[in-house]
Image (spheres, helix red, strand yellow):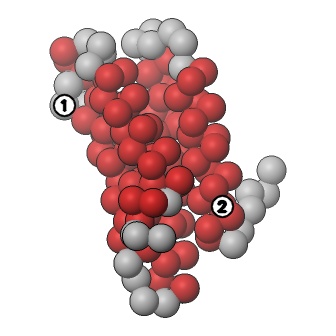
Amino acid sequence: MNGYKDLIVWQKSMNMVVLVYKLTSTFPKNEQYALSSQIQRAAISAPSNIAEGYRRNTQKDRQRFYSIALGSVAEVETQLEIAHRLGYVENISELESLLGELAKMLYSLCGTYPNE
């Protein structure tokens, strides 16, 4: 393995960022500095924390950053639902599916599983 860029979870999280940016580009202009900006920051946080965690020296540190990435995925899921309820987006199934995959992968990396 050559680094974090080889991690499937990092690659999928980068795909999620691209999808989020494409999606938020269709939001109303008055959301540019509100929900749009917030969902973009949360999306960017996921691959950033995966990369940072990968480069940490201890398993405990790695898991901490993977856990932060997992929290960012949950933020994107929540903000996506808000955008959907506000009528800014109609079909969110592709992004929801990707977010679900990311969550499962990150739970596995963290060594924890949801209480669902």
- Pick whichever, 29 or 52, lies toward us: 52
Q: Is residue 72 left or right of residue 24?
A: right
Which residue position holds label 1? 33
- Pick whichever, 44 or 88, lies toward us: 44
Q: Nearer the viewer, mark 2 or mark 1?
A: 2
Image location (x, y in percent) of residue 44: 33, 48
User: How many residues crowd mark 2 within 10 Å: few (<14), some (14–19), many (20+)?
Assistant: some
Image location (x, y in percent) of residue 59: 55, 85
- Pick whichever, 42 or 53, lies toward us: 53
Which residue position holds label 2? 107
Residue occupying image coordinates x 45% and y 54%: 10
Q: Which mark is residue 108?
A: none
Outermost right residue:
116
| Residue 68 appears in the rendering | no
Work out whether 55 lies above or below 16.
below
Where disc 1 sits, the SS reads: loop
Work out whether 34 lies above or below 6.
above
Residue 45, image quadrant = bottom left
